[in-house]
Amino acid sequence: MNVSDFAMFSSLNKEEMIRLNYDKSSERWKKGTLIYGEGSRLNGFYLISSGIVKVFKMGINGKEQIIRFAKRGDIVGYRSLISQELACSSAKVIDEAVLVHIPYDTLLFLIQNNWRFSKHMLELLCGELKESNEYITNLAQKSIRERLAEKLLLLKKDFELDNQNTLQISLSRIDLANTVGTATESVIRELMELKHNNVIDLQGRRIRILDERSLRRVAHL
Amino acid sequence: MNVSDFAMFSSLNKEEMIRLNYDKSSERWKKGTLIYGEGSRLNGFYLISSGIVKVFKMGINGKEQIIRFAKRGDIVGYRSLISQELACSSAKVIDEAVLVHIPYDTLLFLIQNNWRFSKHMLELLCGELKESNEYITNLAQKSIRERLAEKLLLLKKDFELDNQNTLQISLSRIDLANTVGTATESVIRELMELKHNNVIDLQGRRIRILDERSLRRVAHL
DNA sequence: CGAACTGTTGAGAGGCTTCAAGCCTAGTGG
DNA sequence: CCACTAGGCTTGAAGCCTCTCAACAGTTCG
């Protein structure tokens, strides 16, 4: 596991890279494992080397609201770390993952010594904030169907399709519902609707995108 | 107008402060003026010295989704500036304001030369991201009534009450609806409901909070 | 193999939006 | 200075979207 492969560390010089490699630690995590929970104190953040992680918040009646899915190259747990407060979200492995743990002191060291790294972090946060704000607008103004269609397109962008146009992320209906922000039953009904209109095809958790143009139209994009 | 009053510049040394003071420019903005619009290119960000600014995105049918209200000490326009992309939100004055414009080059200079400033910016972004994520959970899971109650409490935290418990921000019903993420009529009905239950009192746009405990209960906090 | 969880479908209820109509307020122009 | 207009505010009614509850089939895993 060599961290120099990752874009977020591309600005580090040799010395910084040596320190990072010394401080970090990699570990394999099984599907379903909680990486950290709301209210816990983190002593570092996690870089995802492989696998998929969901970041979510607990809402009413223990219903999860999924904030984002993180994949290779993404980091999780850095928000509360930088703020030096307790985690206000949880992270769970949904696809067997290898995570690189990077201690707080190392993060601080990099921020203090390498402005390019800081700028990278700033840009990363700005990107996340942009997506969050867009999602707020969608939640407030779009119907379930529109949101689902848009989310499928976003998942396509982030996780891509295989050669049969199948989304390369496997989500339970429950997780999909908690991403779109609706009830499981509603997401199922809308998926069926899209299937009957030949926009997508379903085989269990495999979602094939048959007609991206239609999907885009449904999403109002 | 002396920028050294503001927390976000507390880490600057004398030399940096001189440069900042040289580069910046203050201006008075009338109520209703658009500071920047979605899709525009910014060449700096704005620090709010006085007044109130709303940051919003255009959604379906030109319906605004208000992301946040910014007041003295807050900054707007920095997200797209740091990302060096076109603005993906708009900002409009809703209470006569004095804004300090700080050019991109100055921002970059500070990021490159003062890690404490960068850290400040990182923490600021983390705070905004946290609020955005909490709002996503609320939008997805709470009713209009709950969201309205919570928003009133948040407005109280940010803009405080006068000695008669009146919220020190004057919002149109439309803006309030676009903040909560609902129709104007709905927000009016819920406000009336709260008034009839003696939780709040209304006199035009003035909102008096009579029973914060009840409000907190309604908001499920 | 059973338990626990996920997925699916139907029915009913209710929260919220939309439309419509009227009132009120503030700002404008004659 | 006042009528006028545009936009904000309010209320009612109708109807749809979405949630919840319930029941059951399918699946996974110890």
Image (cartoon, coloured by chain):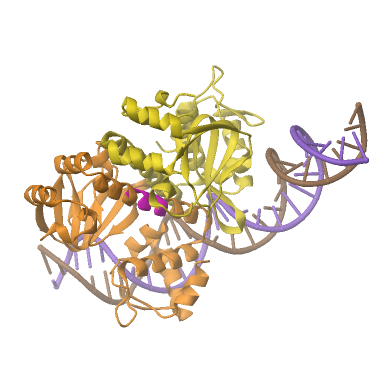
Chain colours: A orange, B yellow, C purple, D brown
Residue B177 belongs to magenta span: no
| Span shown in magenta | A125-131
Relative to A182, is B122 above or below?
A: above
Residue A129 belongs to magenta span: yes
* Rendering quarter of residue B112: top left
Residue A33 x %, y % = 17, 56
Residue C20 x %, y % = 77, 55
Q: Residue furthest top?
A: B163
Relative to B10, is C9 above or below?
A: below
Residue A149 x %, y % = 45, 68
Residue A180 x %, y % = 41, 60
Residue A51 left/right relative to D16: left
Q: Considering depth in this image, is B207 or B41 the residue closer to the camera?
A: B41
Q: Residue at x 59, y 52 (%)?
A: B63
Q: Residue at x 44, y 76 (%)?
A: A212
Residue A216 left/right relative to A205: right
Residue B66 left/right relative to D11: left
Relative to A209, is B11 above or below?
A: above
Image quarter hosting the C terminus of chain B: top left
Q: Residue at x 54, y 29 (%)?
A: B199
Report if residue B131 is visible in the image: no
